[in-house]
Every structure is written in structure tokens, then in C-alpha cells.
Amino acid sequence: MTTAHVTNAQIAADPSVPVIHITRDFAATPAQLVRAHTDPELIPLWMGPDSRTMEVDYWDARSGGSWRYVDRTDGVELGFHGCFHEISDDRIVQTFTFEGMPEAVALETMTFEDLGGGMTRLHATSLVDSFEGRDAWLASGMGTGVNEGYAALDRLLADGQV
């Protein structure tokens, strides 16, 4: 019997710059996590809170590519888009924009640290436009979305779908 690795993400606001740090361990390889973050068929299966429905509009996961998805929840449609600046075997750098606030573009960097034994630590940083913007992200329910999404990703990994 295989037991899924379940843990909550550590989410922290940097006191000196408007950055959010997320750290989370997964029972997966770095390659599996990069695939989970770049495969347009997998993204809607795990990303975000359980209560939302996501539709990928386009997803060109390559260095220099771009992406867009629409969240349709409770009759409300919210669009998000960005550009992939770098995708490598253990790192993704991208922008993230909520279309309701197009001036507030975040720069996100994710690294995937191989811990050995089939475990990988995800390190993510999101540099946002201001301390107020950072605090609004944190107050928006981001922690719920991150943790529910990563729990869904744990299930996909345990089921061998990634």
C-alpha cells in the first residue's frame, strides 16, 4: 500500500521586500514537478482551490512562451496570464498577472530541489508590485488555494498520473 505524502506549504512574507516565499516537499522527482507545472492537461487537475473550475486558454510552456487560463467559479469569470521566461530541468521563471489588476505583474521563480529518495522540495518566490499588493495576495485566500492545489497534486502523483 502506498501512502501519499501530505503536508502544508510554508508560506511567508518577506519583511524587507514585497516577496512571498512558498516551500513544500513532494513525494516526486524534480522532473515530475516541472511536468505538473508545465503540462496544460495537468494544470487544471490540480492548480488552485478545490472550489474553482479552471480552463486553460493557451499554454506554451517553453522559455519565451506564454500562458493564460480562466477561472470560472460561482458564475464569476477571472482571467490570469503570464510569460515563461525560463523552463529548465529544475527551475521555472514566469510572470503572473490577474487580469482584474493588469498593472500588478508578479515575477515568480520556482526551483525544484532533489532531496533524494524520491523527494523534492519546491521553493517558490513571488515578487509583487508593492507591500500592499503582497498583503492583498496573502489575504485573498492564497494559502487555501496553494494547499488544496498541492494536495490535489499529491493525489495525481500517488495515482501515477504525473
Image: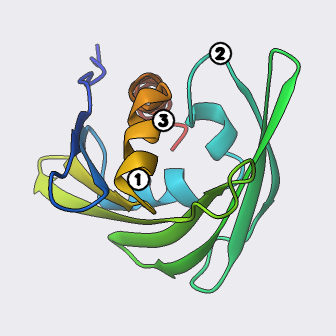
Spatial separation of the CA atoms under disc 3 and disc 2? 24 Å
Q: Secondary structure at mark 2?
A: loop
Of labels 3 and 2, earlier in sequence is 2
Q: Residues within 10 Å of mark 2 (few under 14, many from 20)?
A: few
Total marks placed: 3
Residue in the foreground of this view, choosing between 88 and 56: 56
Instruction: Return the x and y of residue 48 as percentages of the image width and height.
Output: 56, 32
Discs 1, 3 touching: Cβ within 8 Å: no
Visible residue check, residue 66: yes
Q: Secondary structure at mark 3?
A: loop
Spatial separation of the CA atoms under disc 2 and disc 1? 23 Å
> In the rendered view, does 160 fall on the left or right side of 82?
left
Question: Which residue appears at 32% of the width and 70% of the height?
Answer: 90
Q: Of the residues shown, which amino acid type is indicated by label 1?
A: Leu
Residue in the foreground of this view, choosing between 136 and 43: 136
Q: Residue furthest bottom?
A: 64
User: For the N terminus, which image quadrant?
Assistant: top left
Residue 160 numbered tag: 3
Position of residue 70 relative to residue 74, above or below, is below
Of labels 1 and 3, earlier in sequence is 1
Instruction: Return the x and y of residue 143 as percentages of the image width and height.
Output: 38, 28
Question: Which residue appears at 68% of the width and 52% of the height?
Answer: 101
Q: Which residue is mark 2?
A: 51
Q: Which residue is mark 1?
A: 33
Q: Residues within 10 Å of mark 3 (few under 14, many from 20)?
A: few
Residue in the foreground of this view, choosing between 1 and 128: 128
> In the rendered view, does 122 fall on the left or right side of 42?
left
Of labels 2 and 1, earlier in sequence is 1
Question: Which residue appears at 27% of the width and 21% of the height?
Answer: 6
Which mark lies nearer to you, 3 or 2? 2
Q: Of the residues shown, which amino acid type is indicated by label 2?
A: Ser
